[in-house]
Every structure is written in C-alpha cells, then in structure tokens.
Amino acid sequence: MNTTRQLIVTAQPEFAQVAVTELQQLEPQVEQCAELAPGIVLCAVPHAEQFMQRAARQHPLFVRHLAPVQTSLPLDNSEQDIGAIAAALAALPTFGLLERGIHFSVQSRLISTDKSQGKRPYSSGQINQALAAAIVDETKANESIKKPQIVVSILCTSDTGYLGISPVEDNLSSWPGGARQFAQTAEQISRAEFKLLEALDVFGVSLPSEGRALDLGAAPGGWTRLLLEAGMSVVAVDPARLDPRLAGRKHLEHYQGYAEDYIEAAVRKGQHYDVIVNDMRMDAREAARLLARAARSLKKEGFMISVLKLPHATQVIDPLKTLKEALNILSQQYTFVQTQQLFHNRQEVTLVAAHPRQARR
C-alpha cells in the first residue's frame, strides 16, 4: 500500500505542464507520472518532503499547491472508504506531527476518473468532518480550518486514495489545492474583486486605510470599490462606465479615458499615489510599459499590484516568452516582491511590486 517519493501538483489546467516543467528546473529528477484530472498531476521525486520545502522557498510561479503522497490505498466507493483512509493515515510516520495543541486541518478533494462510477456515498465535507473528529479524539490536536499548522491531504480518484501529512508552509497554500475561496456579498460589483482579495492574502500586503490609489482598467469598478472601502481616495481610469452603485461615492474620481493619456498627464503634473493597481485587458508587455511609466507617480513607500494577461499558446506564440518580456520591462522601474498565478487568475498572472527606492531602505 505504500507509495514513496511522490507528490501531487496542482495548477491552472492550461498551465499544468508549465508548472511541472517549473519544478523540473528546480529538480531535474522530478518525473510526471499521471494527470489525475485537469490541473492535478501526480509526480515522483526523491525525498518528496524535502523537495516541497525547497519549492516553497523558491515561490514557483505556476505551481499553486503541493501535497505529499506518503501512502495510497484502493477505494471501492463504499462507506468503508473513510475508515480505510483513517487507518492508513494513523499508520503514517508523519501522523506524529499531530500533537496535543497543534492546529491542523483535513483537506480532501474528490475527483472522478471513471465516468461509469456511481455517486459516492460520501462527500469531501463528510471525510473532513469524520477524520478531524477522530484526530482530535486521538491526538488532542486542535482543528483549525483557516489557519492550520499541519495539513492532512487526501485526494480520492474513482479507485485510489492518495494521502499525506505535512506542515502547511510546504503545501504553498493553506487552502485545498490552493483554491482560495471568498464569499460573495451583496455589495460585490464583479468577480474580479476576488483577484485583488486573493493577491492581498497571498502576497501578505494590506491596503492603506488612507491615501490615494490609482486603479487602471477599473470598469466596472470591483477593485475601485475595495480601495474605497479600505478608506482610500481613488482615481478610476477606464473608457467604460463604472457600476451605477459607485455613482456619487465620495473620494472617487472617474477618468473616462485611456490609461496612457491619464498616466502621461499625472507624471507631467507631478501627481503621486500610495497604491497603483491594474487589471487592464491588454497584452502583458504593453501593460508593463504603461506601468513602468506610472512608476514615476508611485510614492516612495507605495506598492503596485497588477494582473498581466497572457496569450494562448500556439505554434508561433509562447505565453511564457511574453511574460518574461513584460517582467523585464517592469524590473527596470520596480523591485519585485512576488509573481504568481493565483486561483482566481485564468490566462494571466498577478504580481506585487515595490518602488525600487523602498527596497533599498
């Protein structure tokens, strides 16, 4: 039943192979074993746990989540599967990480690899609940879904369960599969708001409670709303109209025109901003050129968060080449803190960057 030297890699389906290649550049012995589902790949590598630690230090761009496979077991799609999973977990040497007072979470994912399989007699939520209760009873550890120290990872295909236990920092994300979820609210203007919320969470930055923000590609206004709610004054730049719910909001100016025109005027007038954000729908390199120009208007202690749109790969178009060129343009004006493809990204990546003078303090 033991499976050694394996881990599960999760990425956006369109970039799953790029994610595996990214890991192979870090460790040439990484071998792709199987694609379990779109964006979920089973890989083999010597000393998987140590390799996960190395990967976490490198902050891979397209790898969203890693989970160790320390054992696997056959599943028969019955209620007995949960008991079998519990027994297999208890037999792992890493089960000892679940000590009294340790905060842990059970993260299970169910994927179907057999279209003829009937409905499972259990859900991921039922697995999580049953195993968490058993772990608490056995070890006196504390279940903490939002801020775990240790993660119990379970991936169930139609016929196999892949199990592992690891420190949360080795998984790259504390969310199952790196799928950072946010609840919709009545005030929400667009789902694009999730991209900014996830960026703030993943990159560990906070919006100022005052100051000025420049929102490029603002329409319909989701990011603008979040900036206003934080307490900032916002200049929203977009030729399109903003959501009617933003009409009349204090501390909001809508420049209904093109970003390049506004940026040139802002630089010429010596205007400065504490935060610059961008979600413009344009080629990543063109967006990078505009943001590089906008750096002149970023305050010394300011930061920039941007989404960069990537083209679909073809025989003549390499999206990674496009991204590399865009990042090279930006590196001439900004110091990069982190770049990553987030869960709420699709054919794009998100980055957070600081003013270069800030990094040299």
Image (cartoon, grey):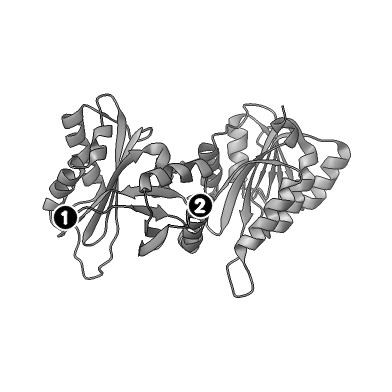
Pinpoint residue 198: horizontal percent, then vertical percent.
51, 42
Left or right: where 67 falls relative to 358: left
Other residues around mark 1 within 10 Å, as few (<14) / some (14–19) / many (≥20) = few
Residue positioned most to the left = 80
Q: Nearer the viewer, residue 78 or 324?
A: 324
The secondary structure type at the circle numbered 2 is helix
- Residue 234 occupies which quadrant of the picture? top right
Other residues around mark 2 within 10 Å, as few (<14) / some (14–19) / many (≥20) = some
> Is residue 183 in view from this perspective?
no
Amino acid residing under circle 2: Leu
Pinpoint residue 101: horizontal percent, then vertical percent.
28, 24
Amino acid residing under circle 1: Pro
**Sequence-wise first label, 1 or 2:** 2
Q: Which residue is mark 1?
A: 121
Q: Which quadrant does the C terminus fall into? A: top right
Q: Nearer the viewer, residue 121 or 192?
A: 121
- Residue 322 occupies which quadrant of the picture? bottom right
Left or right: where 272 falls relative to 22: right
Q: Which residue is mark 2?
A: 26
Q: Nearer the viewer, residue 222 or 42?
A: 42
Q: Which quadrant does the N terminus fall into? A: bottom left
Q: Nearer the viewer, mark 1 or mark 2?
A: 2
Q: Is residue 311 above or below residue 187?
A: below
Q: Between marks 1 and 2, how big is the CA–CA gap?
A: 40 Å
Mark identifier at residue 255: none
Left or right: where 161 falls relative to 356: left
Q: Residue at x 61, y 63 (%)?
A: 319
Left or right: where 83 falls relative to 311: left
> Is residue 58 in view from this perspective?
yes
Pinpoint residue 25: horizontal percent, then vertical percent.
52, 56
The secondary structure type at the circle numbered 1 is loop
